[in-house]
Amino acid sequence: MRRYSPPAVAVAAFVLSMAAAGCDSGADGGDPAPADTTLAGLAAKHDLLFGTAFDANFATLEPGYRDILGSQFAVVTPGNSMKWDATQPSRTTFRYTNADAQVAYAEGRGMKIRGHTLVWHSQLPSWVSAGNWTKQQLMDILREHVQTVAARYKGRVYAWDVVNEPFEENGTRRQSVFQRVIGDDYIALAFQWAHEADPDARLYLNEYNAEGLGAKSNAVYALAQQLVAAGVPIHGIGMQMHVTETFYPSTNDLLVNMRRIEDLGLDVDITEMDVRLQLPATQTKLAAQASIYRGVLDACLAARNCRAFTIWDFSDAHSWIPSTFPGFGAALIFDEEYRPKPAYWAIRSALEK
């Protein structure tokens, strides 16, 4: 893969920003206090939370990763450790070892934690997905899971992706086990149960390929309308933003969608952004990627209800893309050696305004 080589001046500026955040090579996560030179500190001037997902065991991570993670972000999202297969692998067993460690790490550095995710059709243990449940049985299972996990982190997780990816591309309901057995009401029930377990947490419906305008985003909007009208405790829509160099929403379509959601009294968060490139990642592709990141952030900054901007991990060394989309990669804002890429500088430029 052809590597991006940033100009020496750019590298020097990034090193200075790390130093201003109290972070040096080999430090155990840096100083959590936001500095004006970090992404978190720059975003805070816009009342925006800038975050990242992370998933690996912190103790085993390279110093370069730890330095950036501990200094540049205001919010962290555990990538997999809070999902159903991780937290309730059997009907009678709950476990939180990895999730607890990630939450403790974030709390120790003054970061907020975004919970991800309470209800999802994927990474669901077979005892749930393959069970021959009655409607009442599955409602009881769903309620127990949502309330047990949400209560575990009551007062510690500031927001939850309560229901993840409930729609197909054409805007119809995804036929998950919850949709088939419980029906449409499972979504409202999950939000109500999460709210009962942690009344102060912000609760989100999280979806991909529904960021711009189209059948899927219309379905998300219509559901949000229904939930708000019914008094369901929902606070926002999560826009995942897993896009490519050729498939991404325009800044205008994003703004239109964000503003109609604002009219419902709901926030929007960019929750999982990455921009995967077909390899090799040439200078031209990296420049296009930077432009896409910048366009999405510009829309977020222009929308009064966009409260957070999270990337789905920050270094290509820890991206999910290559194993899921063979032939694609280089999706994040730092390369595999933790050097800032053009996308980093594009984001920084937008935040410095």
Image: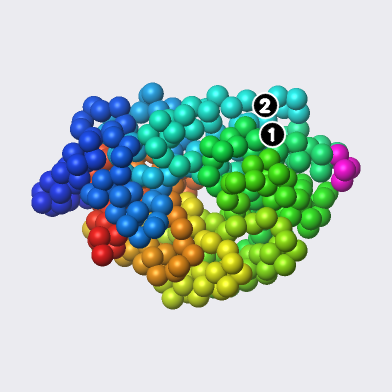
Q: Is residue 294 visible?
A: yes
- Quarter of the image for the C terminus: give it: bottom left
Q: Amino acid at mark 1?
A: Thr
Query: x%, y% of residue 170?
Result: 65, 67
Q: Is residue 286 visible?
A: no
Q: Residue at x 25, y 50 (%)?
A: 36
In the rendered image, which residue does mark 2 sit on?
94
Task: Report whether 305 appears left or right of 154.
Answer: left
The answer to if 318 sits in the magenta stretch is: no
Q: Are marks 1 and 2 in contact (CB under 8 Å)?
A: yes
In the rendered image, which residue does mark 1 sit on?
148
Which contiguous range is marked in magenta? 133-137
Where on the picture, by quarter, is residue 142? Answer: top right
Check the image and report above or below for 67 versus 282: above
The answer to if 136 sits in the magenta stretch is: yes
Query: x%, y% of residue 210?
Result: 56, 64
Q: Nearer the viewer, residue 277 or 202?
A: 202
Q: Residues within 10 Å of mark 2 (few under 14, many from 20)?
A: some
Mark closest to the chain's N terminus, 1 or 2: 2
Q: Amino acid at mark 2?
A: Phe
Where on the picture, by quarter, is residue 52? Answer: top left
Check the image and report above or below for 212 versus 201: below
Q: Residue at x 68, y 68 (%)?
A: 225
The Cα–Cα distance between marks 1 and 2, rounded to whole angstroms, is 9 Å
| Secondary structure beneath label 2 | loop
Task: Report whether 199 appears left or right of 79.
Answer: right
